[in-house]
Amino acid sequence: MITKTKKSEIIKDLSDKLSRKKIAIFSDFHGVSVAKLQSLRRLLKKTGGEYKVAKKTFFDRAFSGSGITLKAKELQGELGIAFGYEDEVSIAKTLFKFSKENETFKILRGILGNRLLEDKEIVALAKLPAREILLGQLVGVLQSPMRGLAVVLGGNIRNLVMVLSKIKGNKH
């Protein structure tokens, strides 16, 4: 039996994690072994996140204290939450990959900032390229007009040099 002080500590801890998170992803871990959940926790820790399991009533109390309108009791199965404190996409990628490797593990819902996400939106987030790749693509898009302008301006100078060299060749 958990004491009232222990319960309030759990709720306070969950509320603190909810206030610090960039993303929170709810999942049903029913049927997943403890060893596999431990490996998931290690993977999430590498990406700046963590995975917590508690009773749905604890989650509901933490949600109400954090201003989240979601009700944990409405979610099916045994509830666990992955909190992401650094990169939102890497947490979603890790959970998505884990759900593919473990059939009974299901991604249910999520919170990105203060916005509620459906499972399909989390999967779409997980399928995004890595942050470094997206930044590289952005740099390429921003650099493209400048590169085009440089080629056009260089072409005019190149044409002028060719015309002058032909004129020079005709005079001799």
Image: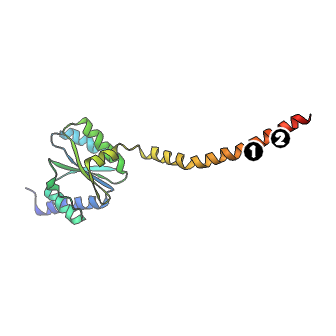
- Circle 2 sits in a helix, a strand or a loop, which is it? helix
Name which residue type carries label 1: Ile
Q: How crowded is mark 2: few (under 14 residues within 10 Å), some or many (20 or more)?
A: few
Q: Is residue 4 above or below residue 75?
A: below
Q: Which residue lies furthest to the right in this view?
A: 172
Q: Where is residue 102 in the image (x, y as percent from the top left)?
A: 22, 37
Q: Is residue 31 left or right of residue 127?
A: left
Q: Is residue 108 above or below residue 162?
A: below
Q: Residue at x 14, y 60 (%)?
A: 7
Q: How crowded is mark 1: few (under 14 residues within 10 Å), some or many (20 or more)?
A: few
Q: Where is residue 20 in the image (x, y as percent from the top left)?
A: 31, 60
Residue 55 or residue 39, whichever sits in front: 55
Q: Residue at x 37, y 51 (%)?
A: 87
The residue labelled by disc 1 is 157
- Where, by quadrant of the figure, is residue 96 drawn? top left
- Circle 1 sits in a helix, a strand or a loop, which is it? helix
Mark 1 and mark 2: span between their CA atoms?
Answer: 11 Å
Q: Which residue is drawn at 24% across and 42% down?
A: 38
Q: Residue at x 27, y 59 (%)?
A: 18
Which circle marks residue 164 in the picture? 2
Lower position in the chain sequence, tag 1 or tag 2: 1
- Where, by quadrant of the figure, is residue 17 drawn? bottom left
Query: Quadrant location of the N terminus?
Result: bottom left
Q: Can residue 55 be seen from the camera position used here? A: no
Q: Where is residue 47 in the image (x, y as percent from the top left)?
A: 35, 47
Name which residue type carries label 2: Leu
